[in-house]
Image (cartoon, helix red, strand yellow):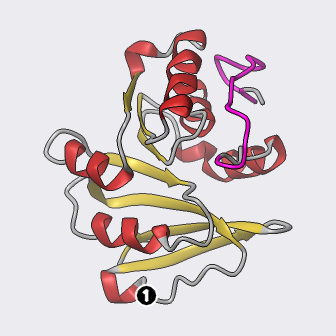
Amino acid sequence: MRIIAGTARSLPLKTIEGPDTRPTTDRIKETLFNILQPDIPGTYFLDLFAGSGQIGLEALSRGASYAVFVENNKKAAGCIEDNINFTSFSKQAKLLTTDVISGIHQLEGRYTFDIIFMDPPYQKGMEEQVLRVLSTSDILKPDSLIIVEAEEHTDFSYLEEIGFELTRVKKYKNNMHVFIQKR
């Protein structure tokens, strides 16, 4: 696993081994950032369920101004901290070692984000829980983009009910990126 492009290009990243993490493959990450690249420079980026931090670090490498990482697993948070330091992004990054809902509440009134990325554990319904919290949170700007990495058959039919709309879906072999914005 590595940074694909930008100022930290080719730097290797640490990750924890085991069934609790599913690092996004380089191919899928490259596809995602090809879509996002015009929107990245100067943004505030939030990486929820951050794992190794590779998505937020890729955003920083490609010109995001600041990134916040939220990760509950202490070992994974240790990897994120090591990766932030190794890539020299410590002045542009903040790590919260807490669950995502608590992390969002801690950020309220302090930050607003242009792009929010989340890759929650599959088949636990966490996408909906987090999106419901985000729908009333002041960390969103009117045009914030939320990207959810999810299993290919994950249900997002509730989005309209909570004030969001699905703007794009990019499907891969077994998963997808769902792009969501406020209506």
First to last magenta residue range:
3-20
* Residue type for callout 1: Tyr
Q: Secondary structure at mark 1?
A: loop
Left or right position of 9 against 183: right
Q: Quadrant of residue 56?
A: top right
Residue, x 47% and y 67% (percent of image)? 126
Q: How many marks?
A: 1
Q: Is residue 8 above or below residue 165?
A: above
- Name the quadrant of the C terminus: bottom left
Is residue 177 a member of the stretch shown in magenta?
Answer: no
Residue underneath mark 1: 158
Q: Position of residue 101 (x, y in %)?
A: 31, 56
Image height check: is 64 above or below 51?
A: above
Left or right, residue 62 beside residue 109: right
Tell whether position 6 is magenta.
yes
**How many neighbours does mark 1 have within 10 angstroms: few (below 14), some (14-19), or many (20 or more)?**
few
Q: Residue at x 35, y 41 (%)?
A: 98
Q: Residue at x 59, y 19 (%)?
A: 83
Q: Horizontal and vertical percent for residue 122?
A: 62, 66
Name the magenta segment's main secondary structure: loop
Query: Can you give x and y, in whole percent of width and height, for residue 37 in the image?
Result: 62, 43
